[in-house]
Amino acid sequence: MNKKLITGCLLLAAAFALAFTLAPSKATIYMIGDSTMSVKEKKAYPETGWGMPFANFFDSTITIDNRARNGRSTRTFVEEGLWKPVAEGMKPGDYLLIQFGHNDEVPTKKSYTTPEDYKKYLLEFVNTARQKKAVPVLITPVARRTFDQDGKLKPSHPEYSQYVRDVAKANNVLLIDLDQQSQNLLRELGPEKSVLLFNHLAPGEHPNYPDGKQDDTHFNELGARRMAELVLADLVKILPDLDSHIARNKPVMK
């Protein structure tokens, strides 16, 4: 084999190696949480979890796997076997978004989780992700629309949001404070305009809710998108490498 042929083969091999090296890697963003994040059935429309529009923000190199379920707490998510397939499916380079609290914090619900167990399960999610070399991100529970008679927004999750912050700080976990961010948005909009983000329907307005609906916890499509935008804005700040995976319109060539 002459030198030119050897050199050509080496250059070709180097080109193939470089191509594979520069090819965009694919990753999965797993999402675990409750009804404020989950994918909704058609019969619930226009109720929309913020994880639904969130899935449309990324290009083909990112897969969104939203495992959030209505009514679940950290404890019931584990006890019902919903966590196991996520734990087994994560691989190096993946991400895990964790948002619970709405159902953990209510003592009258079967999903109630004590503060000690709440923090324990949050840490279990984090540690498992780290063992799989995935990146965990803790998210405080999104705010409810609860204004008092004077038009002031009341904090929705003062204790359980703080538990999330505490776990994040003590274990050096990335944190998105969605509770605070969403409260800021609701205060900015005020009692009247903020209704436009939630699943509020007059009787007869939608066939899925013939008697109407006054829901200050779950979002409509607009509200879900606004909350998803808050999460995305913070996510690319704490994980700037994800910015290059955002789906953006390309200029039309003329």
Image (tube, rainbow, N blue to C red):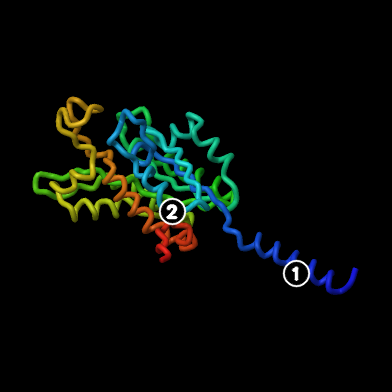
SS under mark 2? helix
Relative placement, left or right, of 115 versus 217 is right
Q: From the viewer's perspective, is the residue at label 2 or at label 1 nearer? A: 1
Q: Residue at x 37, y 33 (%)?
A: 70
Residue furthest top as drawn? 210
Relative placement, left or right, of 236 versus 95 is left
Residue 114 showing in the rendered view: no
Q: Residue 182: image x %, image y %?
A: 27, 51
Q: Residue at x 21, y 30 (%)?
A: 206
- Residue at numbered disc 2: 168
Residue 198 showing in the rendered view: yes
Q: Which one is nearer the viewer's eye here, 231 or 115?
A: 231
Q: Residue at x 36, y 58 (%)?
A: 233
Q: Residue 72: image x %, image y %?
A: 39, 33
Q: Label 1 is placed on what type of residue?
A: Leu
- Residue at numbered disc 1: 11
Q: CA distance from mark 2 to mark 1?
A: 48 Å
Q: Label 2 is placed on what type of residue?
A: Ala
